[in-house]
Image: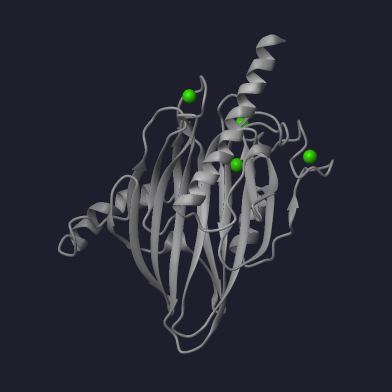
Amino acid sequence: MTDFTTYRRGLTAGALALAFVASNSAYAATMTNGNGDGQVSIELDDNGAFSTAIYNPLGAAGAADAVYASDLYLRTSSGVTSLSGIRANFVTGDQRQRTSVFTLGSLSFTLTQTLSDLISDGVQTGTMLTQAYSFTNLSGESQALSFGRYLDGDLNFGAGGNGNDGGGKLVSGGQTVLFETDAATGRNDLATFIGIYNEGGEALGFDVDHYGSLRPRIGGGSSLNNLVNGDGNGDGFIDAGGGYDVALGLINGFSIGAGEQSLFTTHTIFGSGTPGSVQVPGAVPEPATWAMMIGGFGLVGASMRRRRVGLAAA
Ligand SMILES: [Ca+2]
Ligand SMILES: [Ca+2]
Ligand SMILES: [Ca+2]
Ligand SMILES: [Ca+2]
């Protein structure tokens, strides 16, 4: 599953072959905003896939790898392609933002990956990874296609190990946001979590399910079930105590005319707080809406403080 070792191992031969192309050619790069609370260090592939994301949650728990696998599956009339197998090259970038380009079939892509601090009252509460895939239909015919985002977190910051995580779904700003949480405690309890949401095209479905059944489904071209597996009481989150090794899937569909360009964006939130308090903007973030979103995360921070006060008084 972890292809990263292979890329690393292949880098020597690859570097020889590519040495004359560009000095910064590489299949993977570290993007980081630090190693303190709320910060991450992600080993990102040029295609956007990753299997290592060192996250340091708020509080005493230290930094640890929080992701087993993240990938994007492109579905077209000729089948489903895991972008983790696509070789591109980073053409520009630094530790906060990188751009890469690649062509797949009759589609050309420019991928821009950006890390943003999530700040509340001067304190970093988390980090957002934004992966924006701008794509152009090079063919002479319109195409129907979709992007399936897959994330399998490995959250082991103090509760239940990797195989007893929680999670669920909420809707914020018109967006479906999916969560994997360190423990199965519901949507309004403090948690270390990873959240994902997509922008662009038409929302075609979601699933919060066991990784072993979700990955073949999203990678095999099946429809998703629009279900949170383990949500017996209907609040959109896995019931308290019912945790398992959770994975998340979200599909967005597009119809793109000949020669046209479009944009698919998938976001990954590394956060600490109550998932039920997370708010995201309903449109592609512009500077003004970033401020709104950071305000939304302020609610997370406020909620955490209330809870901490409550716990201390108890
Ligand atoms: Ca910490
Ligand atoms: Ca856990
Ligand atoms: Ca529930
Ligand atoms: Ca998992």
Colour mapping: one colour
In depth, the one of 222 and 255 nearer the eye is 255
On the image, the x and y values in percent for residue 108 come to 40, 74
| Residue 211 in sight | no
Q: In which quarter of the image is ligand 2?
A: top right
Q: Quadrant of residue 87?
A: bottom left
Q: Which residue is drawn at 46% across and 47% down?
A: 129
Q: In which quarter of the image is the C terminus?
A: top right
In depth, the one of 97 and 22 nearer the eye is 97
Q: Which residue is drawn at 48% across and 44% down?
A: 128
On the image, the x and y values in percent for residue 105 come to 44, 77
Q: In which quarter of the image is residue 95?
A: top left
Q: Which residue occupies the extreme left position in the image?
A: 20
Compared across the picture, whether 16 is left or right of 233 comes to left
On the image, the x and y values in percent for residue 158 come to 59, 24
On the image, the x and y values in percent for residue 213 come to 67, 53
Residue 182 higher or lower than 75, as above or below: above
Q: Residue at x 59, y 48 (%)?
A: 280
Compared across the picture, whether 258 is left or right of 189 comes to left
In depth, the one of 305 and 28 nearer the eye is 305
Compared across the picture, whether 22 is left or right of 57 comes to left
Q: Quadrant of residue 14?
A: bottom left
